[in-house]
Amino acid sequence: MLIKGHMTFFFSEKDIFSNWFISEFEVKGVQFNCVEQFMMFCKAKLFRDESLAQQILAVAHPREQKALGRKISNYDDAAWCERRVRIVAHGCYAKFSQNAQLRDALLATAGTVLVEASPYDLIWGIGLAENDPRALNPNQWRGQNLLGIALAEAREWLINDQDSRTCHRD
């Protein structure tokens, strides 16, 4: 993670904000080892590919989970595009809400734009590395930064959780 101005840049599976960062969490009684696994599992469930959903849960590495996610039957790109950010935001919320250290790190980014500085990813990242001068200007990004958007949404939900707990203490 690197903070420059009003932006928090991250990239690589070693960074806690990455979907590939290993961190156990649970959603509706199902255990996940990372947000990538959650995303691919939900993608398989969305398109009613139960067999692949179970295969995704059975593999440990995010690279394998992603590869399985590309084999989902009945895949509909328009339907996936409509739901993907909300799905990932829910996975991020589960991951960060169930681990105090990770939650505190995400909350510490409040007031900054979360930016996946992947030079390779034009959907979830910005298509630029953090050291590329264009990375500081969202108008020059090559990618959509959907992971940054999903993380920001999860961060808002965590902030609202804190606000509601504070209000109930009065």
Image (cartoon, grey):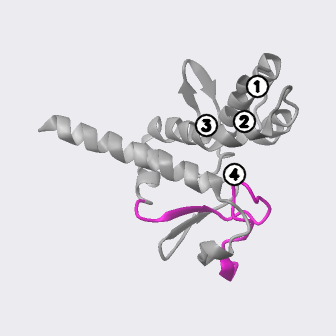
Residue visible at 70% across and 34% down in the picture:
37
Going from N to C along the chain, the mark reached first, 1 or 2, is: 1
* C-alpha separation, residue under disc 1 versus residue under disc 2: 9 Å
* C-alpha separation, residue under disc 1 versus residue under disc 4: 27 Å
Q: Find the magenta span and give its range.
A: 110-134
Residue visible at 63% across and 29% down in the picture:
32
Q: Nearer the viewer, mark 3 or mark 4?
A: 3
* C-alpha separation, residue under disc 3 versus residue under disc 1: 13 Å
Q: Which mark is residue 75?
A: none
Residue visible at 41% across and 43% down in the picture:
157
Q: Which mark is residue 87?
A: 3
- Tell me if label 3 and label 4 are in contact, CB under 8 Å: no
2 part of magenta stretch: no
Q: Nearer the viewer, mark 1 or mark 2?
A: 2
In the displayed structure, does residue 119 sit left or right of residue 131? Answer: right
Going from N to C along the chain, the mark reached first, 1 or 4, is: 4
Residue 158 found in image quarter: top left
Q: Main secondary structure of the magenta part?
A: loop
Q: Badge 1: how crowded within 10 Å, few (<14), some, or many (20+)?
A: some
The residue singled out by tag 4 in the image is 13
- Residue type (three-letter) at the residue carrying disc 3: Ile
The residue singled out by tag 2 in the image is 79
Residue visible at 49% across and 42% down in the picture:
96
- Residue type (three-letter) at the residue carrying disc 4: Glu
* C-alpha separation, residue under disc 4 versus residue under disc 2: 27 Å
Q: Badge 2: how crowded within 10 Å, few (<14), some, or many (20+)?
A: few
Q: Secondary structure at mark 1?
A: loop
- Residue type (three-letter) at the residue carrying disc 2: Ala
